[in-house]
Image: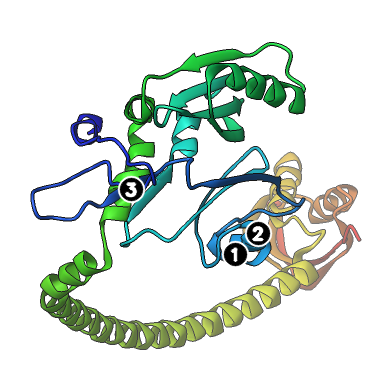
Amino acid sequence: MKDIFLKFISLYDEKGIRPFIEGKRGHPSKFLFVSPNICFFKIVDLPRGVKKVDRQFVEFNYANLSPYSNPSYFFSVKDGKLMLWFYPQPPSPYPVVLPLGYIATFLEKSGTKLIKVPLSKDNVALFLIVEGVLVSEVVHRGEEGGRRNTIEMIKKKHRIEEIEIVELAEEGELIRRGLESLSFLETLNLFIFPLFSLNLFKKIIDEVRFPLILLLIALMVNDYSHYVLLGKRAEALRFELKELKEANLLIESRLKEIKKYTRLWEAFYKKEFQGVPLLDIAERVAESVQEAKGQISWLRLHDDKLTAYLIAKDLANLIEALMHTGLFEEIKIVGTVRKERKGKREWAQIEGRIRRND
């Protein structure tokens, strides 16, 4: 990319308004470098808090520094310093206009150096650069002896004791070496992007206008179709949600009924059977009857009552054994006691009230 620019570099005339890129025959150049012969350079400190510097800011605050009426200008910002170059309006507009002093800052981005560039037989441009910032731009007109005095004055003004002097053969060398030191991104920002003029932009818009319109229409139709589809899907989901809510209400109602009956059964069980282990009672009654050598014809346990039909040789002894278990508050015979004619066994129905463990 840089080689393309280097092929077209040419010298300036005495007024410094000659394009350094000729372009094709018959076509005007797009680039202009301005010589220090006609540039007025000024460097100022930016006020604190200023974060953005644009052309409007420069015109409003620093246009009064120019010695020219209705001037053109170029500016650059680095390390809180604003570098300004004012120059007369060029004879024709150029997308890219760069002062030679600005190009000099590309060569020396660190340290303190003085760049000498011959402009003509007797004129020499002196660029003092400190850490990549141009702090002084002077054109000396005269012989070598006076030139040394000018350099000493520059050193004294900026309080510099020792300085390295870089001597270049001509303006073209300054431009060439400055371009060679640029990065690709810097080259794009300074040269390529400004070439995309308004006419080219309009031409591009004219070419893509109708395809863009068709594309937008297609996107709108697609978005509308998607919107309708989403609306139908949302309606179906709302209907499904309504059905699920109704089914859920029915399930909740049935769960409430089940919980209600469960609580009733739990209360009934606690009331009727708490402290009455029926299986244990039946087992202990059977053991007592067996120890007394009796028999149980039938037995029923209900609530806190035991009803049984017992057979034994001594029924009274059996009833006393049952009372000794501690399970009953009382036992009584219901009806009459019957006896075998030939045998010695007795049988009768008894009722016993079970003792609760409250």
Pinpoint residue 125: horizontal percent, then vertical percent. 50, 30
Q: Nearer the viewer, residue 257 or 220?
A: 220
Is any atom of residue 350 visible in this view?
A: no
Which amino acid, mark 2?
Answer: Tyr
Label 2: element kind: helix
Among the two numbered marks 3 and 1 on one chain, the one whose residue lies closer to the N terminus: 3
Pinpoint residue 115: horizontal percent, then vertical percent. 51, 22
Distance (Cα) linking label 2 and label 1: 6 Å
In this rendering, the label closer to the viewer, 3 or 1: 3
Q: Tell me if label 2 and label 1 are in contact, CB under 8 Å.
A: yes
Q: Which residue is mark 3?
A: 32
Label 3 crowd bin: few (<14), some (14–19), many (20+), radius 10 Å: many
Q: Quadrant of residue 335?
A: bottom right
Q: Nearer the viewer, residue 331 or 225?
A: 225
Q: Residue at x 11, y 71 (%)?
A: 207
What's the mark number on residue 23?
none
Q: Tell me if label 3 and label 2 are in contact, CB under 8 Å.
A: no
Q: Nearer the viewer, residue 91 or 132?
A: 91
Q: Residue at x 16, y 80 (%)?
A: 213
Label 2 crowd bin: few (<14), some (14–19), many (20+), radius 10 Å: few
Pinpoint residue 1: horizontal percent, then vertical percent. 22, 34
Q: Which residue is mark 1?
A: 59
Question: In the rendered image, which quarter contains the C terminus?
Answer: bottom right
Q: Which residue is mark 2?
A: 62
Distance (Cα) linking label 3 and label 2: 23 Å
